[in-house]
Amino acid sequence: MTTSAGETVETIACGHALTLADGSRVALCRVRPSKRCFIPPPQFGLVCEGLVRSGQPTEVNFPFLAKLNLKTVVWLAPEVPSDPFLDFLRENNIAWHHVGADEFLATYDPLSEEAVLEALELILDPAHVPCAVMCNQGRHRTGVVVGVLRKLQRWNLVSILEEYRRYAGPKVRVNNEQFIELFQVEVIRVPPPPPPEQLSTQSQ
């Protein structure tokens, strides 16, 4: 069946029924997305060409992610991804890098400058594109890294913080905003662009 939102779903009888006021009974069903549904992960968004952001995906998001042909995932949460997600990465030959795993931060502390630099060096390397940057919820750690990237892209601070707040929702953290504002992007090492295809072919 197709929902009012245009999503294709599969109905599965669950053996229960609901009795209505007029005495009639209606069979109850469980509904799950069909394999043809492409559902993005929580907090999913396009950052720029070749880079997306999100929270941790679940199995229902895997068909959508498979369509992105990702080469790399930059994982910012302190704990490792879930086993199903790791299996998905392995089955699709997607490399993943655990950034900030050794940091013992309080719940509301932003990533360290070193972790942000490591994440950005991975994201900015053309060898890792298409790339996804993720943390558990896709709000704070991911938001800090994307915010610093926006500074490197010369966005104005108002637009940077508006984007951070849009993904953070009611859980905005002022210390994350301060971190983004004070970060000195001059310390970021931007990888050189790859050589032209013709030149690289001639050098072989």
Image (tube, rainbow, N blue to C red):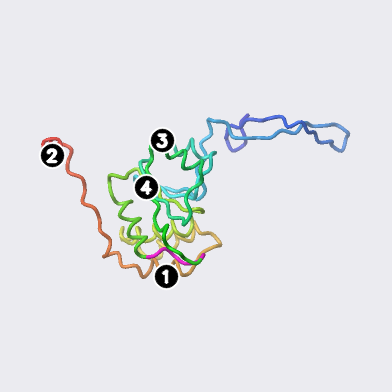
Ranked by sequence position, the earlier of labels 2 and 1 is: 1
- The Cα–Cα distance between marks 2 and 1, rounded to whole angstroms, is 44 Å
**How crowded is the residue under tag 3: few (<14 C-alpha within 10 Å), some, or many (20+)?**
some
Pointer 2 and pointer 1: residues touching (CB < 8 Å)?
A: no
What residue is shown with label 2? 199
> Looking at the picture, which amino acid does disc 2 mark?
Leu
Q: Residue most toward the right? A: 23
Q: Nearer the viewer, mark 3 or mark 2?
A: 3
Q: What's drawn in magenta, residue-wise?
A: 107-112
Whether 131 is among the magenta residues is no
**Image coords of residue 73 (percent x, y):** 39, 46
Mark number displayed over residue 51: 4
**Image coords of residue 145 (percent x, y):** 39, 58
What SS does tag 1 mark? helix
Ranked by sequence position, the earlier of labels 1 and 4 is: 4
What residue is shown with label 3? 92
Ranked by sequence position, the earlier of labels 3 and 4 is: 4
What residue is shown with label 1? 178
